[in-house]
Image: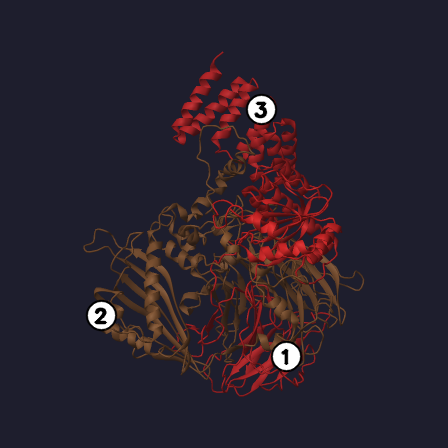
Chain colours: A brown, B red
Amino acid sequence: MPAGSPSAEDPPHRRAEGRLLPWPGSGTRGVLALLTGWLLSSCDGKKGAEAGEEPRNLEPAAQGKSALGELAGQNPVHTWQKVDDPAADGWESEILAEQAKKQLGKLGALILSGKAGTAEDLAPFLARGFSGSQLVPPRPLVVFNDATVWVERAPAGEKGLEISTDFQAAVKAAAREFSSAQETYAEFKVVEVATEGDSTEGPPAFTSRQIVSFSGKTGEGVVEHHATWVTRWSQRAKVDADSPPKLTSLEVQDFERAVSKRSWFADGSGAVMDGDPVYSAQILRGMNHWLERIPYRASLNPMGTPGVALGDVNGDGLDDLYLCQEPGLPNRLFVQEPDGRLKDQSVKWGVDWLQDSRSALLVDLDNDGRQDLAVAIFGGIVVAQNMGSRFEIRAVLPTSESTTSLTAVDYDRDGRLDLYVCAYDQDRNTEADAPALGPLGGRFVFHDAVDGGPNTLYRNDISAASGWRFTDTTAASGLDQDNTRWSFSAAWDDVDNDGDPDLYVANDYGRNCLYRNEAGPGVAAKFRNIAGAAGAEDPASGMSAAWGDYDRDGWMDLYIGNMFSSAGSRITRQAQFKPHLDSGLRRTFQHFARGNTLLRNLARPDQPGFEDTSVAAAVTIGRWAWSSNFVDLNNDGWEDIVVANGYLTGDEDGGDL
Amino acid sequence: MMNAGRSFSGHERNCAFLNTGASSEARGRFANVSAVSGLHFDDDARALAAADWDHDGDLDLWISNRNAPRLRFLRNDSPTGNKRWIGIQLTGNGTTCNRDAIGARVEVVCGNSGATTPVPRSVRTLRAGDGFLSQSSKWLHFGLGEAQAVKKVLVRWPDQESRVEEFTGLEAGKRYVLAQGTGRAMQAPKRSEVVKFESSSPVVPPASRVGRVPLVTLVPRPRMELNDFAGQPLAPAAGKPVLINLWASWCAPCLAELAEFREHAEEIRKAGLEVIALSVDGLEDDKSAPRDAARKALDKIAWPFASGMATAQTAATLQSHHDALISLNRPLPVPASFLFDARGRLAVIYKGPTDVKTVLADLIHAEGNREERWVRAAPLPGTSIDHPAIRKNADRIESIVHFRNGLAQERAKDFEFAAYHYAAALAHRIEFPEAHRSLGNLSLLRKDWPAAAGHYESALALEPDDPATHYALGDTYRKMSQFDKAAARYREVLRINPQHLDTRVKLADSLAEAGHREDAIAAAREALAMARTAKNDRLIAVLEARLRDYQQP
């Protein structure tokens, strides 16, 4: 903000919004567009031209893009766009889901209010002849109990009560725990809706299945309940009907309750940062603030790419933090003070770069004992040498433009750390007006896209003789196979315990890659993608990859961040979803919506393989997940999981997947 | 949606899942501890890095976000009870093994005798980068549960030998540095002080739409309606900078801003700046202000500069320029001002009120090179890396900005300005087939067939497999009566997309026009067969008529 600029309140521009200066796309999108935003591929009306229309005279500038676009869209390789497009069918179920969610939301609020229970309170929710189960099991089984947390679950097979008066008791029992709770929160994610045939007697009905969560701070500590509610509703309301549906039955499954005396983590952001002016000037302002003020845009910018790297730049034994920032905002090197606080030293160290940065690493590239800096920016990797109190740029390695995660490993085990950077989209001159992420290229296939940007492996050839040299060995190492799949993240580990590093790459819009390093005695590092044979493709919207031995057998397992979508889950489970698809592809689409994936390493040294344990382990619902990683939160030696998630929070609410 | 600043899967809460591996009753199912963990912020979270930041024996977390706060420090305060831990940092020899020992496998073996079999192992790999955009600490942290003693630590170094080195004599609750080849664990010094961690949720300042946006890519002032109150066109003097201010009579900050301009009228004149105040009163169906309120308001302050009413065209043009240059495409607020330099290029956009001092200081913004403007445009001070590879990337971005402006102008039917921008997109010698193609389209509109053909040919030289360009070029050649060349283009379309019946008809037509009657008949028959397969009655009729035409002598 320049000096003298007013910090006054916003002008009364809102009066003018919407009529004075309309802008394209400002209209409300239909509910269908919102829910199908999950299947981003072709919601914006790109339809192939009807084959065999009367020949037209094409006046490109006049009919312009659309006519030319139609031509491109008609290529047979593009027909997957039609498969990917759920907008072709009618989705009454979406309206039902919305109604169910609304009703349950009210019921949830009643429960959290702690004063639920009268027949009148419940009347709006219950149909005649309602039967339900207990919301909170009366005799839970303690499944985990240590100093940090108490976890209990419903014993398998416990069935509930059958008449509505007991439902009052059930609601009361559930409400009791939250009667004086603070910071309460309830959430219902409707993951399945099924309509019942109109031919059955009585009013039309539907069933829904939802993931239910309650939490709050009570006298006992922090409490959370999680369960699946299977509900049957009395009435299948018309699209425009006002009267909400009522419950005819409710069955609670997979109930789980966790209690801890206090929250494990405390927000110490202010304590470690508010002494530095950068905190209020930069850290406390979100992307939307900057996006309104920065005259620049490239792919991935609006999404936000605040990469974080920890490492000790000044050799004082304390980790420091490098924060990547989007174009026009300076990256920050926060050096840790002896007392744990952060001090911005990006100017002093010469790394307050304004370039469009995505991810960074603090690693010793020249083996001199100092942590050097590598930053993946738009179209390259900036490599800077640590000179003791300052970084000096030694190279800018060209890469595909839309870089994402950066990793380092010594893949050829020559004693020098090499760099591998992921790329998302291919270099494009134009951006499509996409509803969300924007990959609307002509050959784009939502469920198995192969038209992303290439990832790059740079071999470290630094030597006293040649200086800071890096060589692109992507092709020579075999990593050019399946290398254009919209990659967000990569992680190296030894999948087969043979001593050399293997690579897992998480890709959006389809299959992930597991590159096995086939180096051996006298054989140079060479990679082969074995994801298919190893059961590690996990076709979904891969956002992050992490290795960890969660079952403690000495073999590294995988946790992959994806997108959980209740809308996608609902749609793909219905008969009218792509009726022409074979069951395998249908399962693929369902898998896309399932969420995060846990793959257990089968401990086969000769033929690496994985078992998908995600559902049994109950770790799929990470929402719109980004960094998802193993962290032992409670020091018991067992790797827990943390999921950083959420896509875009704006001023106005849009679709919630 | 993203460009409009709306939510999409927003307000989602972070998740935490507890590994219940120690409990047989849990049957391998993790427990959802999102709330209990205290990590369930509803931020748009991105990166996640773990470290025992305060050296108190548990893993703390750094999480970065898209929205504010961009960075959170989350201190692990969990009541771990009797559970032990150990922290390990590795040092490779720096010759056969990388100094950071990235890729090393470390196993901590505890002496928990009498434990169940098989004893759960504690194995970690040291990595540089995982998750999404994240690098965690190179200090490996091992929770040891209630194990009493550490028997040994095994390190498999990431070099050609992959040799496992054993370290002994380590104690739980301490931090050690293990150097390759020494076999000895050195205890790291204890930190002397740690800040008092008051837990506090960051207070994010309220959103503000007031902002000054100096531009990096300069675009010429588009043709737009600038009318005085009588509806007569205003003509800003050539060679002088101009500030166009949009305001409304009902907008208090607007009036305050205009008053400030008036107060400094002399300074503004001296600086050679022209100011044009355009009222948006009454635009479209706005009836909130009386018809002459704007003129009266200006009269009241004796407004010394040009003024008039904004038209819908003026407003839409300024909005579309804003949207083409700035990521977040929200409707402009009022007041809003646009500063054009003496050469008529848009230099700075002010959203909300600005002031004379700022505007006058900005008169130099358009001077200087792109790098300087880039640094000046940054809302917070920073350094731009000066490197050929980065300049090349900036060229690409600028070409893309021009192309986007070209599309916007084309949509607004200002074809001359559109052509300017498409040409500018090609100025950096970036491969930009789309710009060539767009120039071809504009030439076609002007019925300048040879120019159109030239642009399409340039586009195809860069993107030989674009069926749409082949198609357009085929049409262009037909306009130029170059029927053989047209047929060749249509054949290219069909090579790429054999199903395109439309093109098949045109191919037949162009062959007929070129006088290759037999070929035309053959092409039409082929098309007819495909039309029949496609059961397209309309096209079948068209093609049958064509065939009759061709077969006539």
Q: Where residue A365 sits: x, y (%)?
A: 71, 66
Asked whether residue B75 is in view, the answer is: yes
Q: Residues within 10 Å of mark 3 (few under 14, many from 20)?
A: many
Sooner in the amino-acid sequence: mark 2 or mark 1: 2
- Compared across the picture, whether A122 is left or right of A557 comes to left
Q: Where residue B7 sits: x, y (%)?
A: 48, 58
Q: Looking at the picture, do discs 2 and 1 lie on one chain?
A: yes
* Residue located beneath label 3 in the image: B478
Helix, strand or loop at label 2? It is helix
> How many numbered marks are there?
3
Residue occupying the far top of the picture: B553
Query: Could you tell me which chain the residue with mark 3 belongs to?
Result: B
* Residue located beneath label 1 in the image: A340
- Compared across the picture, whether A588 is left or right of B302 comes to left
Look at label 1 and name its amino acid. Answer: Gly
Q: Where residue B496 sits: x, y (%)?
A: 54, 36
Q: How far apart are labels 3 and 1 at the CA level?
A: 74 Å
Residue occupying the far left of the picture: A201
Question: Which mark lies nearer to you, 3 or 2?
Answer: 2
Circles 2 and 1 in contact, beta carbons < 8 Å: no
In-front residue for pair A580/A435: A435
Q: Looking at the picture, do discs 3 and 2 lie on one chain?
A: no
Helix, strand or loop at label 1? It is loop
Q: How far apart are labels 3 and 2 at the CA level?
A: 78 Å
Q: Give residue A112's quadrant in the image.
A: bottom left
Look at label 2 and name its amino acid. Answer: Ser
* Residue located beneath label 2 in the image: A164
Look at label 3 and name its amino acid. Answer: Arg
In-front residue for pair A205/B406: B406
Residue found at x 26% / y 65%: A124
Q: Where residue A300 sits: x, y (%)?
A: 58, 55
